[in-house]
Image: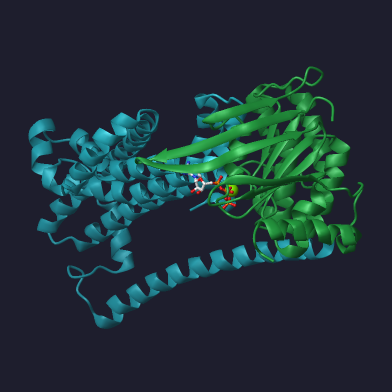
Chain colours: A cyan, B green
Amino acid sequence: MIAPTIRSGERLVGDNLQRYTIAVLSHLALVAAWHFFIVLGKVPTFVMPSPYATLHALLVPNYRWIENISVTAIEIFGGYFLAIVVGIGIALLFSWFRVLEMTMMPLLVTLNMIPKVALGPLIIVWFSYGIGPNVAMAFAICFFPIVLTTARGLREVEPDLLDLVRTLKGSRWQIFTKIQLPGALPYIFSGMKVAAILAVAGAIVGEFLGSDRGLGYLMLQVQVTLDTAAMFMAVILITLLGMILYGFVLALERLLVVRDARI
Amino acid sequence: MSEPFIHLSGVRKIYRTRGVEMLAVSEATFDVGAGELVSLVGPSGCGKTTLLKILAGLHSHDAGTVRIGTRDQPFDPARDIGMVFQQPLLLKWRKVLDNVLLPAEILGLPLAASRERARDLLRLVGLQGSEEKFPYELSGGMQQRASIARALVHDPKLILMDEPFGALDALTREKMNLELLRIWQKAKKTILFVTHGITEAVFLGTRVIVLTAGPARMADNFRVDIPHPRTLDVKTQEKFGEYTRRIYHLLGME
Ligand SMILES: Nc1ncnc2c1ncn2[C@@H]1O[C@H](COP(=O)(O)OP(=O)(O)OP(=O)(O)O)[C@@H](O)[C@H]1O
Ligand SMILES: [Mg+2]
């Protein structure tokens, strides 16, 4: 029994290593393809920059990369964090007070149908320019999926399991902490993963609509001068921010949710 | 029989949903002695689960009396019921040992002692070595064993089992039948075992109670006069055939 287990364990490690190597190689291949496309196709830089030109854009001090990255990161992470706290909080209230869910959920569904982007001009009127409104935009766009999945997860409790706790005269709090909440965790994470992607989009849209800082704002600035290299760099950095957020959520999920329960 | 551990008399249950009345249990009258393993058998919808839930205190009944416990063996409804369902219903995020501990945690029993007891019980149900595994690492039969250990961890006097082996394959099911008999004799519990397996009911039960549907009613209640410990051989005995035929007859399935 023991020998085959170890062997399959080794294979698993090998498989992972192989997978990561392949992933890295395919990314490098994309960069290489990009490079040769520009060089061999003699594509002018203002249409599409080479990887080298893109990297070179980082050296322009005027673009204040560090500051712009920080601003966008604060908007994304701030809006996202707020959405998690408020979203999970509201879903918990819904599960504790059925009347609240019955009255508020349909309202939330309707509100969610509003294209959040359309609220941009209003948000600017209310909060003016700056980080605040963009945090609000990221929040607005990723808050609802978290409420929805969390509420669903809290509702999905095996009735027989409830009976089991009830025969032991378990309290509502015990049901909540021992069964409901841990059972809802996989659902919460599935909402958080969707929301992570939306939060990035929300922050950038906010910056497009009205802002004086951030990577989205920078893209609009360099658009005028046709500095596509800087635009490319900005997109890459935004993507990286999204990947960091997503990776963090994924790591947290691995830590907290048993493999079999992940959805 | 001396004073019975469970005494039911004329128990009736009516479900009312949207103005429609549904007679789920009627005329349920039977006694169960302490330490008996009683099979409740009957077709789908005849009220077996309903009866168990009444005994578990999860449902009220509309008529009749239900009394559990004796003077020597008082019954505490919060501590003296262990439940096993058709699905193991283990918590996916807990290791097997922690799953078994759930009732002890809810009752606030001393944890160190309960942990020891849980380990002993896992050994009793044949799951030694699986304490630190997650449910998904166990087969269906092993998961059901764990749920039996969970039903025993707070040392309840009464175990209610609702088709516990209904989701298992035939071979595992026979094995679990033997296991259950062994566990029952070791743990010395009163067990009410719901099934729609007629041979299973006779093989396990010291007594068999037959329920019929449409209208729901109790049709029979007889002792199975086959001594324990039983082995699979008893199924070939003439007496065994008579008992199963008796049930088939009552259920109109000859
Ligand atoms: N909560 C409920 N509300 C209304 N009717 C119910 C409820 N629970 C059960 N019933 C009805 O009562 C009858 C008995 O149900 P019960 O679940 O006790 O049957 P059962 O013998 O356990 O059946 P099965 O073998 O299929 O599990 C059925 O007709 C069922 O439809
Ligand atoms: Mg049933």
Left or right of A25 in this view: A167 = right
Name the spot of residue A106 as percent of width and height, x first: 23, 41
Q: Image point 33% across, 73% down: which residue?
A: A34
Name the spot of residue B184 as percent of width and height, x first: 83, 41
Is B105 above or below relative to B38? Answer: above
Left or right of A180 in this view: B75 = right
Q: Nearer the viewer, residue B71 or A75?
A: B71
Q: Nearer the viewer, residue B70 or A138?
A: B70
Q: Image point 15% across, 40% down: which residue?
A: A212
Q: Quadrant of the N terminus of chain B?
A: top right
Q: Image point 84% across, 36% down: which residue?
A: B187
Q: Is residue A39 visible?
A: yes
Is B165 above or below relative to B147? Answer: below
Q: Image point 19% across, 74% down: which residue?
A: A44
Image quadrant assignment for residue B139: bottom right
Image quadrant assignment for residue B5: top right
Name the spot of residue A165 as percent of width and height, x first: 59, 32
Q: Quadrant of the C terminus of chain B?
A: bottom right
Left or right of A81 in this view: B229 = right
Q: Nearer the viewer, residue B11 or B123?
A: B11
Name the spot of residue B22 as percent of width and height, x first: 46, 43
Q: Nearer the viewer, residue A68 or B231?
A: B231
